[in-house]
Amino acid sequence: MGTITEHRTPAGHVAPTPRPPEERRRLGTLRATDVYAAVGAALAALSITFLLFTRFTGFTGGLGFAATAYALFLGLYTLLVSLEEDGPAVRDRVASVIVHSLAALTLAALVFVVLYTLLEGREALGNLNFFTEDLVAAGPLDPITVGGIRHAVVGTLVEITIALLITVPTGLVCAVFLNEVPGRLARFVRTIVEAMTALPSIVAGLFVYATAILALGLEKSALAAGLALSVMMLPIIIRSADVVLRLVPGTLREAAYATGAPRWRTVWHVVLPTARSGLTTAVILGTARGIGETSPVLLTAGYATDTNTDPLHGAMTSLPLAAFQLVRSPEPAYIARGFGAAAVLMALVLLLFVLARIIGGRGPGQLSRRQEHRRVAGSARDLRRIESRRAGPTNGPGAPGKPARSHP
Amino acid sequence: MANGVETIQRATEPVPRRPHSDSGWADRLFRSTLRGGGFLVLLVMSLVGGFLAYRAWEALSEAGTSFLTTETWEPDVGEFGIAAVITGTAMIAAVAIAIAVPLALGTALYISEYAPPRLRRTLVSLVDLMAAVPSVVYGLWGLFFLQGEIVGLARWISTYFGWFPPFDVTGADPRDPLATATVYTASTFIAGLVVALMVAPIICSIMREVFSQTPVGEREGALALGATRWGVISSVVLPFGRGGMIGGTMLGLGRALGETIGVYMIISPVFDIQWHVLQTGGNSVSALIALRYGEATSFGMSALMAAGLALFVVTLIVNFAASSIVARSRSGAESDS
């Protein structure tokens, strides 16, 4: 809105005074009448819907009940509020109700998707053999107590390790390149990388299938799957690492250059350590994306039921692929195993995500208390060393210097 | 950083110095390693694009413009085209976006405007986590839970809104109580719903990011003028975040177009343009690739490559449009979404 954005007067008209960092104010005021209106409307809506469904009409179905009740609730709530308030306030209340319910619906649906998988998978997850056996011995009619997904867990780990061995060095070097050697080439590479994040994962799989398997004669194997995952993960990791590296404060680099450090020392001792937590997060989140990806693996890894640890030969199944293939069977035990595999996969992704949160909760340069302690101790040690050297051969010019703090 | 260099140069104004022109062999080695890494990535990426284009060319030159207009997919008899699959992809994505955007917008507004601060961080993490949930999990849920529950809604929509052509279902008779429900399963609508839940967290997290960057001064200006909370949202937050909203939606669209497994698990593939959203059968480019890659001959492979390339071009355009919209908007200037 023009009227509001024009508040930003150009500097010079008004003398800018230094302001403390802005903080948003809490707007929460809940009056008793608001609660009465909401509760009353909800009760009335439920009652009317109940009457409609059981007495007056032939409506049936849970979804219909919920939808009717919600529509009635909105109408009644608007009515109740408009008895006391005027236009803008009524709109505010109704909008608030709609936003709240959209959010509740979305979050509930998303959480339900995850819980449903865990719930359906609990039958398989309860058996120890599910984690210690593979599916070779399990016939089509065997119960859930025979066979498991060891092969898929092993396969996932092998494939993601291959992918990480390829993507982490390449991705980080490329991200550092984008930040440290700016120029036309870096801009071009950045554009290409951004373009490749749009590559659908199945096309990455198709590419590796056509090159490595059909043209170069590689077997359908973990190596091919790792390559396909790498093609998919590389742009993701480069992009997020690039963003993290860009956040490293320029003052730190300048300080390093001012001490006369060459570029590689600046990068190695200042830029990378500062961004370490962010880079780790970038890699972990990329791993989480790669680990759950089914379509590139579907084309390149093949499907096996035995535990295969040889990345070069033989089909190797990963968890998402196992989940995908197992539920296509009509046998309930296989479907339960499929859900179990999906639940294990979910747990892995959750673990990676929590790990990323713990490591990457801070921005670059922000240290935990222990890290800060270590830095201060380290720079105090440096200072002692410098001073002892200075005190040794010659007595330098007398300025003792203050203890240097590494950085805020 | 160019910035650093400039600052140093300015600091030593009298004798302009170029501190990085040559700072030893180690540095030169370091820079060439970095450049090598950049070139390597460039090489890999252009190899992917180039190879796709090269292999696709064989099929494209054979099919010509009929590649865009043919609906069937029989590359070995020379009858193939992406008319059906690309339309199917677009329709699934359209259903997904139509459902995901209101949900994501509501959630983003709730998290940034209404949620108590203590809950806010948890919700942000929750949404980010949901964006990382593997698509096969959504697919399982769609196949085993949603499909059974949603048939009633599909039937209801087609019964009462069947006069609107996309909602029409041929072969369904709402008056027949014994009619089978299978005409409503495995439809574009259900696949779209599953994809909607997949992309909603992605869209939501971009929108929330942008909303939370709204300048506090402008918010408080609106409040001081007597705006209600919704007044602040509609006159400050939404206009400020418009670029991010559009960009986030388009990024979600890009993901929805490329989604494979969720669609492949739900849909029953047909090779006609299926305008009836609620009716069983549909298709998408990625489902086509997953379905046909195994049995493809060499020429069939290059036809699939052409389809993959077409999909890639579409997602590429969508993504670049999205990022340029985000970057050009006021709100996108500082965010890297």
Image (cartoon, coloured by chain):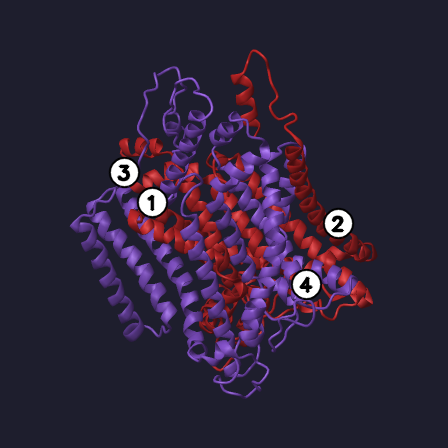
| Residue B187 placement (x, y as % from top left) | 56, 68
Can residue B90 be seen here? The reply is: no
* CA separation in Å, label 4 and label 1: 47 Å
User: Which residue is most to the top?
Assistant: B14
User: Which residue is most to the front?
Assistant: A393
* CA separation in Å, label 2 and label 3: 54 Å
Which colour denotes chain B?
Answer: red
| Residue B135 placement (x, y as % from top left) | 53, 63
The residue nearer to you, when weighing B173 against B296, is B296
| Mark 1, residue position | B113
Could you say which chain is coloured purple in the image? Answer: A
| Mark 3, residue position | A25
Same-subunit check for callouts 3 and 4: yes
| Residue B257 placement (x, y as % from top left) | 59, 55
Between label 1 and label 3, give the one nearer the viewer: 3
| Mark 2, residue position | B50
